[in-house]
Image (spheres, grey):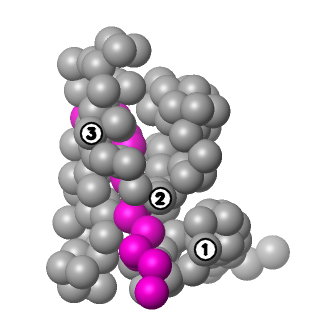
Amino acid sequence: MSERLVGIVFAHAEVAAALVAAVASIAGEDHGLIPVSNDGCDRAALAARLDAAVAGRSAVVFADLPGGSCAFSAAAYALSHEKIRVVTGVNLAMLIDFAFHRDLPLEAAAERAVATGRSAVTIRGVPR
């Protein structure tokens, strides 16, 4: 059996830690998510934090903002690391789903995360 995927939640300030704590309270401690904050980082420090979290494993990096420093840093990192996929616009639904599907192949896990995240964004309670 191959090693389970890890998810790196790469976000601004305390967002990553808060999302990972929320997943742990719902899915339990075997969620496979590692929070990484960009707080106080320049470009080199962002890359170093990401590299330390990935630690050579296959991973999906969940960045908070598609146009933010975390997403840009993760995308640059992924260019030279074939076992990394980057998903932007992270939400709680995609992280919970990822926690329960870490045995999927890397590409399938990233695609599933995007599909789950998109399907969780809806408008409700507004009569039209």
Question: Label 2 sits on what residue type?
Answer: Ser
Residue 3 pos. (x, y %) = 40, 74
Q: Residue at x 63, y 33 (%)?
A: 79
Q: Is residue 38 above or below residue 65?
A: above
Q: Residue at x 55, y 40 (%)?
A: 81
Q: Which mark is residue 77?
A: none
Say whether marks 2 and 1 touch (CB < 8 Å). Answer: no
72 with respect to 20 (left or right): right
First to last magenta residue range? 1-13
Q: Which mark is residue 105?
A: 1
Q: Secondary structure beneath disc 1? A: loop
Question: Label 3 sits on what residue type?
Answer: Ala
Q: Secondary structure beneath disc 2? A: loop
Please name the residue that numbered disc 2 is placed on.
58
Task: Compare marks 2 and 1 and give the one earlier in the sequence.
Answer: 2
Question: Label 1 sits on what residue type?
Answer: Pro
Q: Residue at x 27, y 39 (%)?
A: 52
The C terminus, quarter of image = bottom right
Q: Secondary structure beneath disc 3? A: helix
Depth check, front residue: 127 or 121? 121
Task: Compare marks 1 and 3 and give the one earlier in the sequence.
Answer: 3
Q: Is residue 85 above or below residue 47?
A: below
47 with respect to 112 (left or right): left
Please name the residue that numbered disc 3 is placed on.
52
Q: Is residue 65 above or below residue 32?
A: above
